[in-house]
């Protein structure tokens, strides 16, 4: 039986490279488009996960948000990227079933030592999710 991998954010970049590599290893790939799974919309996540069977590998990856001056970030942008980069991935971890001996990878980055002023959206939520992810790894 083929192993299954769910790769979120695999249309280009690192996510695409991971997808291509797992295909070469003969994984059955689940790679939802943004229309199928929009991680900035919690209802989209709930619908998608509801219809998903267990997977062997989960890749949590997403691009963005765009660099933007702190004082120009709107409330809608704060909410969207909170969902996309933090709460959406938390909900996926809470709801998805990973087969025994499975793996979860979070592809993320942030600047802590010298934060970039225009990356506040990305840094805020990626650091928060990294903390949750570390806690999750000790619970499962």
Image: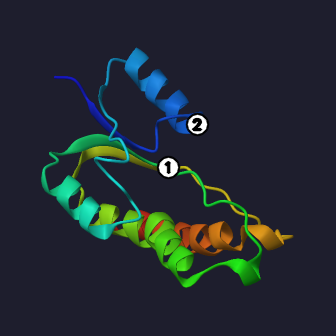
Of the pair 138 and 9, the residue shown nearer to us: 9
Q: Is residue 38 left or right of residue 1?
A: right
Q: Is residue 52 above or below residue 46?
A: above
When asked about the image quadrant of residue 87, the answer is bottom left
Q: Quadrant of the C terminus?
A: bottom left
Q: Tell me which residue sits at (32%, 43%) in the image.
A: 102
Q: Is residue 85 left or right of residue 43?
A: right
Whole-percent x, y for residue 9 in the image: 46, 44
Q: Residues within 10 Å of mark 1 (few under 14, many from 20)?
A: some
- Mark 1 / mark 2, whichever is N-terminal: 2
Q: Which mark is residue 61?
A: 1
Q: Is residue 131 above or below residue 8?
A: below
Whole-percent x, y for residue 86 in the image: 47, 70
Q: Is residue 66 at least partly visible in the picture?
A: yes
Q: Quadrant of the N terminus?
A: top left
Q: Tell me which residue sits at (32%, 47%) in the image.
A: 35
Q: Residues within 10 Å of mark 2 (few under 14, many from 20)?
A: some
Q: Is residue 76 left or right of residue 13?
A: left
Q: Which element type, helix, strand or loop, lies under badge 2?
A: helix
Exactly how many numbered labels are in the figure? Answer: 2
Whole-percent x, y for residue 96 in the image: 24, 57
Coloring basis for residues: rainbow
Of the pair 62 and 93, the residue shown nearer to us: 62
Of the pair 39 and 15, the residue shown nearer to us: 39
User: Mark 2 highlights which residue?
Assistant: 14
When asked about the image quadrant of residue 59, the answer is top left
Q: Are marks 1 and 2 in contact (CB under 8 Å)?
A: yes
Q: Is residue 124 left or right of residue 82?
A: right
């Amino acid at each position: 039986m083929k192993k299954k991998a769910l790769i979120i954010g695999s249309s280009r970049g690192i996510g695409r490279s991971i997808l291509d590599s797992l295909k070469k290893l003969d994984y059955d790939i689940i790679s939802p488009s943004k229309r199928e799974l929009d991680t900035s919309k919690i209802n989209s996540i709930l619908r998608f996960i509801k219809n998903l069977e267990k997977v062997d590998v989960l890749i949590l990856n997403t691009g963005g948000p765009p660099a933007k001056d702190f004082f120009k970030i709107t409330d809608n942008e704060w909410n969207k990227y909170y969902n996309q980069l933090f709460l959406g991935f938390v909900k996926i971890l809470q709801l998805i079933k990973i087969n025994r001996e499975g793996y979860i990878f979070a592809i993320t980055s942030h600047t802590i030592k010298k934060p970039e002023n225009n990356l506040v959206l990305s840094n805020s939520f990626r650091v928060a999710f990294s903390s949750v992810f570390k806690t999750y790894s000790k619970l499962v």
